[in-house]
Amino acid sequence: MRAETLRGLARALWIVPLLLLNTLLHTSVLFGFAVLKLLLPFAATRRRLSRALTVIAENWIAVNSWMLEHFSPTVVRVEGGESLRYAGWYLVVSNHQSWVDIVVLQKVFNRRIPFLKFFLKKELIWVPVLGLAWWALDFPFMRRYTPEQLRQRPELKGADVGETRKACERFRAIPVSVMNFVEGTRFTPTKHARHAEAFRHLLRPKAGGIAFVMNAMGEILQSVVDVSIVYPDGIPTLFDLIAGRVSEVRVRIRERAIPADLISGDYENDGEFRTRFQAWINEIWRDKDSELESMRR
């Protein structure tokens, strides 16, 4: 076994228990507040408990980020984002290459903008400990239906849109940053081969999810926070990060205004609106593709 691999395993043997301990300590407190929120019917009290749950989650991320800074050789270099504020509502979009992206985004934005909330697959609620934590923090769990399921049960068409709108209505209560990986999946060379004619470093963007969020929350969203992430050493795994194999991460933040004519519209049924919305997303993605090229240099 190579010496580098042995060093990585040795690091993991003491860092992973620390990460697990941090997670268990914070989630045990979080679950106590979540039970209170579930039992108490008063709207004002539930809002205060939601805020308390967010503070606990932010503390958990802060400790993880501190360990990344002090127990790891990884340097996260950030450009832009100086005008962002903790109070407000943002729509955050990013390229997606690895589960490490989420760690990086949490480190960069924790307590800098409102707490990041992701749309998660329904199945992730069964992830031990974290699934319940995501539920307690009001992360929206989405059920995706296959074409075959929709053919067998046509009444399910549009159900995912309804779930998105309900989730966004909950987000109006307290400031939040809605996170969306617009490509819909992680970048891999195999997937990129099917999209190579469109972008050099990205998969084609899927505009529907963003359109539904903007339709439900557009008038309170302050801006789009456009994030580009580059790993100069190559796309890492979470184990690479824990094992100290990631020397540098480059992050560039660009705040974009939301076009007034795209805040509301029927993306699903209005073809003209859908074309305009997709053109706007494609323009952002072409800019991002060029930006990723320059960041790699």
Image (cartoon, rainbow, N blue to C red):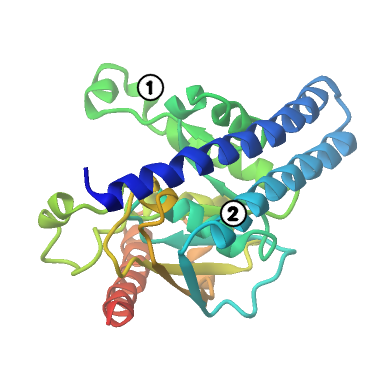
Is the residue 166 above or below the residue 176 in the image?
A: above
Few, some or many C-alpha atoms within 10 Å of disc 1 (few <14, some 14-19, many ≥20)? few
Q: Residue at x 41, y 68 (%)?
A: 249
For the C terminus, the image quarter is bottom left
The secondary structure type at the circle numbered 2 is: helix
Q: Residue at x 51, y 75 (%)?
A: 78
Question: Observer-nearest residue: 55 or 24?
Answer: 24
How far is disc 2 from disc 1 in space, using C-alphas? 48 Å
Residue 138: in sight, yes or no? no
Is the residue 232 above or below the residue 241 in the image?
A: below
The residue that mark 2 highlights is 67
Is the residue 52 above or below the residue 33 in the image?
A: below
Q: Position of residue 223 (x, y in %)?
A: 58, 69
Q: Amino acid at mark 2?
A: Met
Q: Is residue 264 left or right of residue 275?
A: right
Residues at discs 2 and 1 in contact (Cβ within 8 Å): no
In this view, the mark in front (2 or 1): 2
Q: Residue at x 29, y 58 (%)?
A: 235
Residue 124: in sight, yes or no? yes
Whichever of callouts 2 and 1 sits on the residue coming sooner in the sequence is: 2
Residue farthest to the top, as pictured:
152
Q: Position of residue 190 (x, y in %)?
A: 13, 50
Is the residue 186 above or below the residue 166 in the image?
A: below
Toward which corner of the image does residue 111 lie, by quadrant?
A: bottom right
Question: Observer-nearest residue: 100 or 19?
Answer: 19
Q: Amino acid at mark 1?
A: Glu
Q: Position of residue 230 (x, y in %)?
A: 35, 68
The secondary structure type at the circle numbered 1 is: helix
The residue that mark 1 highlights is 155
